[in-house]
Image: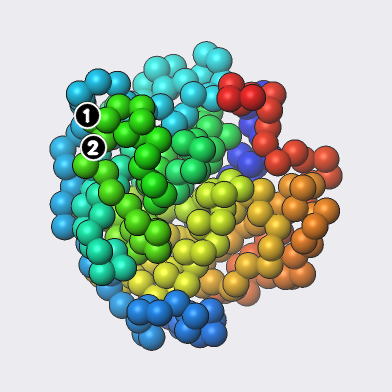
Amino acid sequence: MKTITWVTTALIALLAALANAFAQPPTGFGNAQARAQIPGLPTTPTAVALPTKLSGEIKGPGPMFDSAPSQAAGLGLDHFKYQTKEYFVSGTAASKPYMTRLVVRAPADGKKFSGLVLAESMHSSGAAHAFEFTAAYVMSSGHAAVEILTTSPKQFTDFNAKRYADLHIEDGQAGDILAQVGALLKSDRGPFGKLKVRKMVLSGSSMSSGTLINYLPWHMAFRTPDMQHIYDGFMPTSAGQTIMGVDVPLIQLPTMLELENNVTNRQDSDEPGKQYRLYEIAGIGHVDSRDNVRL
């Protein structure tokens, strides 16, 4: 299928790793030096506070901001009988209130949901690249995709001020927001309700990979209310730096742009709690312009 890309192939590999990983509860705390650089993070694994409020589905006023227009022709949500739902989530992050946007793309028939979720922090350009690049695979497999806003909502209010007037995010809140909203997604209070989220991968591309990488100390510090991992794996793409070790599988996919300037020196590993793969593919561009309607 034309839409099975290198990103999709890596996602399949990561989900396969998750299928065999971490049958035991999380142990260890890892990379104390990286955590120590983040003021206020717990020094032992701690249950994160859930957001204080999840709205009902937002249906107006006016149109929803579309963050995923680059799906393959004929293989969009309608073809796979998927639906998009938008929510607002409120809480306190970095000791300040926030209200963010959460978008869930999932089978219209909940019985078709696989229990696997591909999550991402929305790119500051307004794009849900992780979903766009893997949409046909994600939807043909019954997986869900969610995106979490962690940057300024200005482009939303510019697009539809009435619908998005209450959104509010400040610098320094992204780590707490990703932890809190991620834990909410796995809880009965989240948008999946009684549908069981078995595994959740946090991905990203370029700028949103940077958000993912910056989040990793929060991953090591916070757990769900029942002390399980919030995200069960990570897949940063279009990112070339050496990334701190974490206790869940991580697959890194730099493109030629990153390899020209910053080659990672981390070695692949199958050791439990240190599972890591670096995929370097010659000639891969930073953005797939062939299928991206923005370009």
| Residue 132 image point, x, y percent | 53, 32
Q: Is residue 244 above or below residue 110?
A: below
Three-letter amino acid code at disc 1?
A: Lys
Cα–Cα span, label 1 and label 2: 5 Å
| Residue 38 image point, x, y percent | 45, 77
Q: Residues within 10 Å of mark 1 (few under 14, many from 20)?
A: few
Report helix, strand or loop for mark 1.
Answer: helix
Task: Identify the residue under disc 2.
Answer: 165
Give the color scheme: rainbow, by chain, secondary structure or one colour.
rainbow
> Which quadrant of the figure contains the N terminus?
top right
Residue at position x 55%, y 62% from top?
213
Residue at position x 75%, y 53% from top?
258
Specify the quadrant of the image occupied by residue 295: top right
Residue 55 seen anywhere in this rendered image of the structure: yes
Task: Identify the residue under disc 1.
Answer: 162
Q: Is residue 107 left or right of residue 17?
A: left
Closer to the camera, 166 or 206?
166
| Residue 283 image point, x, y percent | 83, 40
Report helix, strand or loop for mark 2.
Answer: loop
Q: Is residue 106 left or right of residue 54?
A: right
